[in-house]
């Protein structure tokens, strides 16, 4: 290289990045046709890291502080490009800055209901949404796996990928936690912790650290919400089938009265509204359930007819299928009913 050519070349003495906006994860220092001078100063601010790349190879990663780029601080480049020969073999490298600040209030949600396994209901279709925060923890890995040689890489560029990771892992998170859905729905913190445990390794694989996750809402399809409401009603009466059916009948009486006052036109619709398969015509079943509690009065017969027992068993089986009765509760009631046969 001639002396004039050497003089005409532009060398960079100071390399630094002042973030001009939020949401930038990676930024490449604009080299244009310039080259980095031996002994140049690299300034990395708090909440930043810098990656020095030469001909596609990551030579070094720098944390916060001021670094002098010499053959001592970049021994790899000394070996590759002979910096000690003072530009007799000039070269051009790239410096990428990475923001390591927390990227907060990132949204996630389920566009469509997703099906998850549950130990109480077998399978549940739910919707959920919340937010999360993350940061770049391994800039070298993030550079090689995600941002690459782009001039600028934004949080918005990564949003779809991270939302997909969350949705992909919701089912596994609930299954591995062993937490019943009813507990997740009532304790959203447990749900968020289960998601964080499942997702943290997935974020780490691309150089990110999942800092926090919240679940702001969990909702069920309407039909399953009705079943859950019935389950809560069972809990309020201590799981006693007789009391539960008495409770259902008491709830229906005002609706019967309204329907009768209107000419009976609303009775059929009200019957459909009781939910969980308990129809309004179960007055006989309610009387039978009272007998199961051992509270039969002297006016009650000693037993019941076979067809009444079968009808009641079918209704109890329907409640079991909907998750209101457990298998053990169903078996116990069935045994008591069979003893009442005349």
Image (tube, helix red, strand yellow):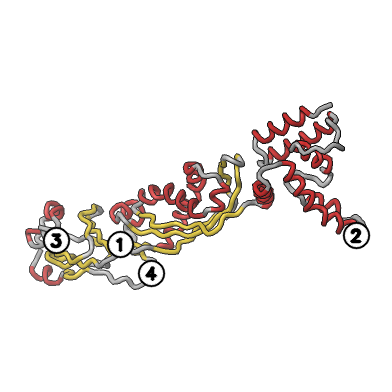
Q: Which mark is residue 111?
A: none
Q: Is residue 7 left or right of residue 51?
A: left
Quadrant housing the C terminus? top right
Mark 4 against mark 3, which lies toward the viewer?
4
Point out which mark residue 90 bears: 3
Q: Which residue carries the number 2 mark?
A: 261
Q: Badge 4: few (under 14), some or many (20 or more) residues near its Cα, within 10 Å?
A: few
What is the crowding at mark 2: few (fewer than 14 residues within 10 Å), some, or many (at least 20)? few
**Relative to 67, does residue 319 appear above or below in the rendering?**
above
- Residue at image mark 4: 22
Front-most of 9 and 210? 210
Q: Earlier in the sequence, mark 2 or mark 4?
A: 4
Q: Mark 1 packing: few (<14 Cα in 10 Å), some, or many (20+)?
A: many
Tag 1 and tag 3, C-beta contact below 8 Å: no
The secondary element bearing badge 2 is classed as helix
Tag in front: 2 or 4: 2
34 vs 226, nearest the viewer = 226
Structural distance between the alpha carbons of marks 2 and 4? 65 Å
Q: Which residue is mark 1?
A: 98
């Amino acid at each position: 290289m001639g002396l004039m050519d050497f003089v005409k070349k532009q060398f960079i003495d100071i390399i630094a990045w002042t973030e001009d906006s939020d949401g930038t994860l990676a930024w490449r220092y604009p080299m244009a046709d310039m080259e980095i001078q031996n002994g140049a100063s690299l300034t990395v601010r708090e909440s930043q890291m810098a990656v020095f790349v030469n001909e596609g190879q990551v030579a070094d990663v720098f944390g916060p502080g001021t670094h002098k780029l010499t053959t001592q601080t970049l021994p790899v480049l000394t070996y590759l490009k002979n910096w000690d020969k003072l530009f007799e073999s000039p070269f051009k490298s790239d410096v990428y800055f990475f923001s390591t600040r927390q990227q907060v209030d990132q949204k996630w949600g389920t566009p469509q209901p997703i099906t998850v396994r549950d130990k109480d209901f077998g399978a549940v279709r739910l919707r959920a949404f919340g937010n999360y925060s993350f940061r770049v923890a391994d800039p070298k890995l993030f550079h090689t796996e995600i941002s690459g040689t782009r001039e600028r890489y934004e949080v918005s560029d990564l949003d779809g990928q991270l939302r997909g990771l969350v949705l992909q892992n919701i089912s596994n998170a609930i299954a591995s936690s062993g937490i019943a859905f009813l507990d997740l729905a009532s304790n959203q913190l447990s749900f968020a912790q289960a998601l964080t445990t499942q997702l943290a390794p997935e974020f780490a694989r691309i150089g990110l650290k999942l800092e926090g996750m919240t679940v702001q809402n969990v909702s069920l399809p309407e039909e399953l919400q009705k079943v859950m409401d019935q389950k809560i009603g069972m809990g309020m009466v201590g799981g006693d089938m007789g009391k539960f059916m008495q409770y259902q009948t008491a709830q229906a009486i005002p609706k019967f009265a309204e329907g009768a006052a209107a000419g009976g036109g609303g009775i059929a619709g009200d019957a459909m509204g009781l939910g969980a398969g308990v129809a309004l015509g179960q007055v006989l079943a309610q009387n039978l359930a009272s007998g199961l509690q051992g509270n039969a009065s002297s006016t009650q017969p000693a037993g019941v007819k076979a067809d009444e027992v079968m009808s009641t068993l079918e209704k109890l089986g329907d409640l079991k299928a909907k998750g209101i009765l457990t298998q053990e509760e169903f078996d116990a009631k069935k045994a008591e009913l069979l003893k009442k046969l005349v």
